[in-house]
Image: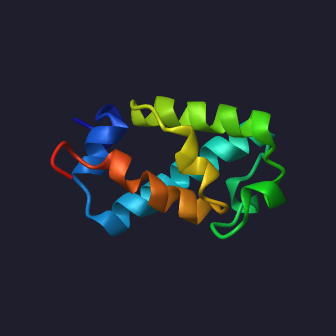
Amino acid sequence: MPADAVPLKARLAAMPDAERERLLLDVVVECTAAVLGHPDVRDLEPDMEFAEAGVDSIAAVEIRSRISARLGAPVPRTVLEAAPTFAEAARALLPLSRGPRG
């Protein structure tokens, strides 16, 4: 089965934390870029703050919704509110991406 066919949450659960965090960072940046209409995800640096990128409260809700859809699990509002940068958001998502015993 190709990696693309495996649900993201299952792929994440099988990865070491460092790889998991990198993939979660990609998800956060991709979802943010899509919501903000950035044509190139490279415009958004890992240490960039959501506010610096132009994320307001309405965009934050949409970003969280997209991340939840990608993960196949709800992302609590507080997870992203407590993380000012994309990299910190990826780290905050780590517990949600682990397997049942993670």
**As rendered, which of 15 and 42 lies closer to the eye?**
15
Q: Position of residue 62 (x, y in %)?
A: 67, 32
69 w.r.t. 49: above or below: above
Rendered image coloring scheme: rainbow
| Quarter holding residue 10 | top left
Residue at the (26%, 57%) spot, across then down: 15
Report the residue at 34% width, 52% height from top: 95
- Nearest the eye: 47 or 102: 102
Query: From what the image shows, is residue 83 above or below residue 58?
Result: below
Residue most extreme to the left: 101
Residue 77: x %, y % from top left: 57, 39
Q: Nearer the viewer, residue 10 or 65?
A: 65
- The relative height of residue 15 versus residue 55 in the rendered view (above or below) is below
Quadrant of image for the N terminus: top left
Residue 36 found in image quarter: top right
Q: Residue at x 36, y 58 (%)?
A: 20
In the drawing, does residue 53 fall left or right of residue 96?
Answer: right
Give percent across and percent down for residue 38: 79, 46
Residue 9 vertical position relative to residue 19 in the rendered view, above or below: above
Residue 59, how many percent across, how many down? 75, 37
Count every numbered label the image shows and give the total.
0
Horizontal side of residue 55 vs 7, given as left or right: right
